[in-house]
Amino acid sequence: MAPRSKKKHGYGVSVTRKYKVLFLCRNNSVRSIIAEALLRELAGHRFEAFSAGPEPAARVHPLAVAQLRPGISGRDILSPKSWLEFTGEWAPRMDLVIALDESVDEHHAPAFPGAPSLLGWTFANPLADGVSADERARLFDKMFWQIVRQVSAFIELPQYAVPPVRDGGARIGAAAISASISTPTATSSPGDTRCADHSLASASISDSANAGTISATIASPDQATTCDA
């Protein structure tokens, strides 16, 4: 269900308010970029997705682009950004901030306007040192499908049917404690071949108006090779 906060835009037309979500990771070149692209692709009619980081890279990592290429539209608009872009007076007011590694959690993040709630999802960094090119490609593939499952489960959560209450410019996490949003954490290490949480739901094709290839591929048994049952 989409948030039902509506605004009138002349001629009696009502527009359903979208839930604004900001994904964070340190360089905003891999995990947060992939999460942004997937949320926009799978449920862009219900969510506005953004991503940023404290030390933005010069470009999106080529292996992240390669993971997105088969089924994601609008890849050309993806670019690493500083999280400070989302702290100014004219920055979009987020409803939810999702930290994808511990270095950007509520203890390290700046104050985002609008009192967004905080979630933490943890995925292993596929850019870890000391792995071969083949192993790195495998880590990117595993991470991508973990994020697909996490985002797919997220868009099915009922908490986001009602827009959150805002209380000024509180730091991120202040409004999240009472909300007690519970989302499975996807944790893994570079050598771990397990999916973080096998209970994560696959994307709903009926709810993913623009998902196309991604939704069809999630449902394919062939993709189960990235996880041990």
Image (cartoon, rainbow, N blue to C red):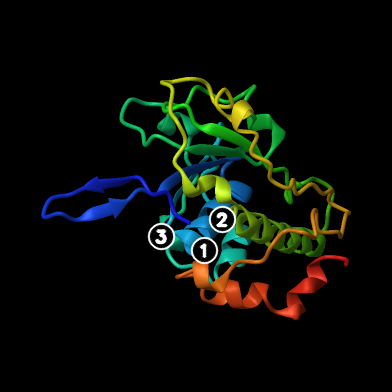
Query: Would residue 113 be found to the left or right of residue 69 on screen?
Result: left
Q: Is 101 located above or below residue 37 in the figure? A: above
Badge 3 local density, few (<14 within 10 Å), some, or many (20+)?
some
Q: Residue at x 54, y 69 (%)?
A: 69
Q: Which mark is residue 45?
A: 3
Q: Secondary structure at mark 2?
A: loop
Identify which amino acid the numbered label 3 is placed on. Answer: His
- Label for residue 42? 1
Q: Is residue 124 left or right of residue 166?
A: right
Tell me which corner region of the image, top left, top right, bottom left or bottom right, holds residue 210: bottom left
Q: Secondary structure at mark 1?
A: helix
| Residue at horizontal 58 percent and vertical 55 percent from the top | 34
Q: Amino acid at mark 1?
A: Leu
* Relative side of 124 to 97, left or right: right
- Residue 70 at least partly seen: no
Instruction: Examine the image and state in which quarter residue 28 appears.
Output: top right
Q: Nearer the viewer, residue 106 or 135?
A: 106
**Disc on the earlier residue, 1 or 2:** 1
Q: Position of residue 94 (x, y in %)?
A: 44, 36
Alpha carbons under labels 1 and 2: distance apart:
8 Å
Q: Are marks 1 and 2 in contact (CB under 8 Å)?
A: yes
Q: Nearer the viewer, residue 119 or 100?
A: 119
| In front of the other: 218 or 125 | 218
Q: Position of residue 199 (x, y in %)?
A: 77, 59
Q: Is residue 225 visible?
A: yes
Q: Residue shown at 46%/44% (left/top)?
A: 162
Marks 3/2: CA distance?
11 Å
Q: Which kind of residue does numbered mark 2 sit on?
A: Ile
